[in-house]
Image: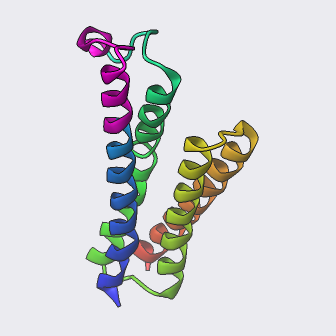
Amino acid sequence: MDKAIFLPVAALVALTFGVALLLLRARFRAAYRRQVTPGDFRYGESERVPAEARLPSRNLVNLLEMPVLFYVACVIFYAIGSVDGAALALAWAYVASRGVHSLIHLTYNNVFHRLAAFAAGNVVLLAIWIRLVLAVMR
């Protein structure tokens, strides 16, 4: 069962790469339409970058911030042999919350819905770490 912890990890990695591909597509589309130039990305994103190209960029940043704590926790669960049904359920719940957050962010982008998904994910991530600390202390 221990190796099963890497399935939600792989799912979150797949989501991250999927959003990275959406970002690449959006930036190429903006360049093709001559809405941006290479200089618009020299120091991040200039004000000229259209919203449809900035949005996946911001979402990708979100997928590279708090999820680092998720990845570390999953590796530690595996390393100490403490992967069980509850750890897996929490891991999948976290991945689901990140998926919902990205879906909201990249589609209709209601800030309150997005915040709810983000907050729910952070609560799950906190639960993962509490469970992990308890497992380490056993």
Up the image or down, 115 lies above or below 136; here it is above
* Position of residue 56 in the picture relative to residue 9 (left or right): right
Residue extending furthest toward the right: 112
Q: Residue 26 at what x, y percent from top left?
A: 39, 33
Query: Which residue is nearer to you in this view: 76 or 21?
Result: 21
Which percent across, then down, holds residue 111?
A: 70, 37
Looking at the picture, the colour scheme in use is rainbow
Residue 109 is inside the magenta segment: no
Q: Classify residue 25 by image quadrant.
A: top left
From what the image shows, is residue 87 above or below residue 39? below
- From the viewer's side, name the closer residue of 43 and 68: 43
Mainly helix, strand or loop, the magenta region? helix
Residue at the far front in the pictured view: 33
In this picture, residue 111 sits left or right of residue 31: right
User: Is residue 82 positioned above or below 18 on the image?
Assistant: below
**Residue visible at 55% across and 43% down in the picture:** 106
Q: Quadrant of the N terminus?
A: bottom left
* Residue 110 as seen in the image, left or right of residue 31: right
From the image, which quarter does the C terminus lie in? bottom left
User: What's drawn in magenta, residue-wise?
Assistant: 24-43
- Where is residue 59 shown, x and y percent of the image? 47, 39
Question: Is-magenta flag for residue 28?
Answer: yes
What residue is at 43 percent from the left and 28 percent from the top?
Answer: 53
